[in-house]
Every structure is written in structure tokens, then in C-alpha cells.
Image (tube, rainbow, N blue to C red):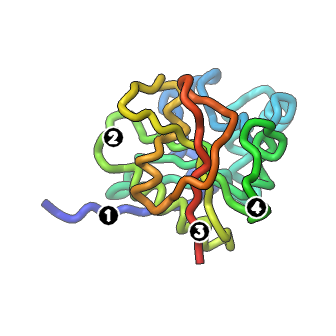
């Protein structure tokens, strides 16, 4: 079997369809476009002129793309919403996921593996690629806010937050707790220092 080729790239306008193939392959208007942490509802309406897809497309035109797409042998298979915490309004204003210190971290908001590619080892290269991209942009550390299911089953609609074990595999450590929950489980603060 030939070696698998992994590549992770920021979701720029020319990669928008690859991002969409991962998060919303049927391009459903009401389906998630990974916008709610970065834009308020009114901003989504204004930016997209009523279309969530158009708002997501325009968000990819900004100087700081909203995340990265991972490719396996050229096919888009994963998405990670990552950026400077200070650029993610929902985190900046969160009373449940507060900063643990004054390090200007980058935050991972969402991790999605494309349907048909789950349980095939995509999350490790996806997260490694996201961390490396953040490092290339000057991030001193990357944080995530997953749960530790400890064998319990997660509601698939909340799986985007990730699990403790998936982040531990790529060098993240627990540095705090949050007051937030996903699937009725507490969310942790996990961090990987860079540099």
C-alpha cells in the first residue's frame, strides 16, 4: 500500500468548495456553515445578504481565514475552525470558557471529519496541520475545549468540540476547566505550547 499524502491548507476563497464538501456537502441553506462563533446572527445576515453559505464564503476572503482544510491524497477530508482567540467573538465574550491566563492563544472551535472518512485516522493529521498553520502565523500556543467522555457516548451534534484523547495524541495537555458542557459533559481547556 502506498504512503498516504496529507496536506493542510487555510480555507481561502479558492478552497471554499473543499471546505463545503467537508462540512455541508449537500449545500443545505440551514445546515451548519461554522459561522456562529465568529459572527453574530445580524452580521451573518449582512455579510451573506441572507445566505449563510455566502457569509461563509465571504469570511474566507478575510485576511485571517477561519480555519484549515486537510486533504488525504488530494481529497478534502477534514475541517478545523481555528484562529486567534481575540478574533473569535463568542470566546471573547464567553462567561463559560474564560481565559486561564494572558497568553494570546489561538483557539480550536470545531473539528469535523467528512462523512465516509471517519474512524480512519484523519483527526491526528488534521489537528497537527491546524497547529502548524497557527505556528506559522505566530501563535504562541493553541487551545481546544473538548470533553472527556470516558467511554460515554457523545451526541453527534456536539462531537465538533472533540475529545480529550484526540487532543492528547497531538501533544495538548489539560490546563483548566470551563463552565461549559457538551453532551452534558464538562468541557476542558487543553493547550499545546509552541515555539
The reply to whether residue 118 is visible in this rendering is yes
Q: Secondary structure at mark 1?
A: loop
Comparing marks 3 and 4, which lies closer to the viewer?
3
Nearer to me, 181 or 121: 181
**Mark number displayed over residue 72:** none
Q: Which residue is mark 2?
A: 117
Q: Earlier in the sequence, mark 4 or mark 2?
A: 4
Q: Spatial distance from mark 4 to mark 2, Cα to Cα?
A: 30 Å
Q: Secondary structure at mark 3?
A: strand
Name the residue located 76 percent from the left edge and 46 percent from the top edge: 98
The reply to whether residue 14 is visible in this rendering is no
Comparing marks 1 and 3, which lies closer to the viewer?
3
Q: Earlier in the sequence, mark 4 or mark 1?
A: 1
Quarter where residue 187 is shown:
top right
**Mark number displayed over residue 63:** 4
Comparing marks 4 and 2, which lies closer to the viewer?
2
Q: Percent x, y for residue 58?
A: 74, 45
Q: Percent x, y for residue 5?
A: 32, 63
Q: Secondary structure at mark 4?
A: loop
Residue at the extreme front: 176
Q: Spatial distance from mark 3 to mark 4, Cα to Cα?
A: 24 Å
Q: Which residue is mark 1?
A: 5
Q: Earlier in the sequence, mark 3 or mark 2?
A: 2
Q: Earlier in the sequence, mark 2 or mark 1?
A: 1
Q: Spatial distance from mark 1 to mark 3, Cα to Cα?
A: 26 Å
**Mark number displayed over residue 193:** 3
Could you tell me if the residues under marks 3 and 4 are in contact, i.e. CB atoms within 8 Å?
A: no
Say if 153 sits above or below 56 in the image: above
Name the residue located 74 percent from the left edge and 36 percent from the top edge: 96
Residue at the extreme bottom: 195
Say if 99 sits above or below 141 in the image: above
Amino acid at each position: 500500500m502506498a504512503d498516504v499524502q496529507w496536506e493542510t491548507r487555510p480555507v481561502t476563497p479558492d478552497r471554499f468548495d473543499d471546505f463545503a464538501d467537508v462540512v455541508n456537502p449537500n449545500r443545505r441553506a440551514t445546515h451548519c456553515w461554522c459561522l456562529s462563533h465568529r459572527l453574530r446572527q445580524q452580521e451573518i445576515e449582512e455579510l451573506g445578504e441572507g445566505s449563510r453559505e455566502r457569509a461563509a464564503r465571504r469570511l474566507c476572503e478575510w485576511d485571517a481565514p477561519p480555519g484549515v482544510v486537510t486533504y488525504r491524497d488530494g481529497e478534502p477530508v477534514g475541517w478545523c475552525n481555528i484562529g486567534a482567540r481575540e478574533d473569535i467573538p463568542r470566546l471573547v465574550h464567553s462567561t463559560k470558557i474564560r481565559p486561564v491566563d494572558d497568553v494570546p492563544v489561538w483557539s480550536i472551535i470545531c473539528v469535523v471529519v467528512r462523512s465516509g472518512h471517519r474512524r480512519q485516522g484523519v483527526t491526528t493529521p488534521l489537528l497537527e496541520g491546524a497547529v502548524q498553520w497557527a505556528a506559522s502565523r505566530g501563535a504562541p500556543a493553541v487551545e481546544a475545549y473538548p470533553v472527556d467522555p470516558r467511554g460515554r457516548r457523545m451526541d453527534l451534534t456536539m462531537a465538533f468540540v472533540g475529545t480529550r484523547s484526540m487532543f492528547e495524541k497531538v501533544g495538548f495537555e489539560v490546563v483548566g476547566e470551563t463552565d461549559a458542557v457538551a453532551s452534558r459533559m464538562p468541557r476542558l481547556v487543553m493547550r499545546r505550547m509552541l515555539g
